[in-house]
Image (cartoon, helix red, strand yellow):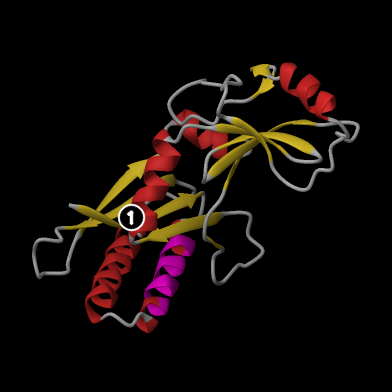
Amino acid sequence: MELLALVLNCGMSSDDLASTLEKLREQSKSIGSHKKRSALWDCYTKMASKANNLADGTFCFFKYSTDTSKDDTEGDVEVVELTKRQKGMVNGGGVELMGPRFKPPEDPSSKTVAYAWMDDAAQTAWDDLMHGEPCIYITPESVWVGTRHKRALCKATGSPLKTVKDVEKLVAELKPDAPLHSVSFHGNEPPAVNAYNTFLAGSFKLD
């Protein structure tokens, strides 16, 4: 089975989520490939049906998979609820998610959102969110721990980094849990600086 679409609901009500999925279904009409268009129509129709049976405020993944060895484009939807830890992380727990984000069509000011990925991006997002190895990156203002689709702010850099020695001093202070945060969905696994996982991101002029 191949994962064709992945949707992450972050607290939407059942009605808002169903409306969001129906909007995605309508947008799929513009896809050029008839086979892909039919598959996504089936995908979002089945996801919306599942959404109608969810309790309001549920945090969960919808995974739509198809058997690519068959001509039949219909697939199956699996609902995977986030654990207490995972929900806490993405619901005010300091972990920011990154990806195509959608608000309820009838309530664009809502604080609840859903994320959606399709095709190869769906499997990439699932693997990254569930198992991605984090890196540590330093911007001119902040230190972050993150993967491709999630990140956590660890600390402000304070005074501007002007020299290589400034960077070396800052990196030497970065320790697991002090201040490096875990973004793992499976346990408290804050990274430690090593030879390949720490880098500068952004514009720097170092002496």
The extreme left residue here reads: 70
> Residue 75 appears in which quarter of the rendering?
bottom left
Residue 24 among those drawn in magenta: yes
Q: Is residue 113 among the parts visible in the rendering?
A: yes
What residue do we see at 55% from left, 42% from top?
150
Relative to 25, does residue 94 appear above or below in the rendering?
above
Tally of numbered tags: 1
The extreme front residue here reads: 207
Residue 177 among those drawn in magenta: no
The residue lying toward the viewer, choosing from 147 and 81, is 147
Q: Which residues are magenta?
A: 16-27
Q: Main secondary structure of the magenta part?
A: helix
The extreme right residue here reads: 159
Q: Which residue is mark 1?
A: 53
The residue lying toward the viewer, choosing from 39 and 42, is 39
Q: Is residue 6 among the parts visible in the rendering?
A: no
The residue lying toward the viewer, choosing from 164 and 1, is 164
What residue do we see at 39% from left, 79% from top?
26
- Tell me where residue 65 appears, x and y as whole percent: 23, 55
- Tell me where residue 34 appears, x and y as whole percent: 24, 81
Q: Quadrant of the C terminus?
A: top right
Q: Amino acid at mark 1?
A: Asn
Residue count near mark 1 (Cα–Cα under 10 Å), binned few <14, some 14–19, many ≥20: few
Decide if residue 123 is on the left or right side of residue 10.
Answer: left
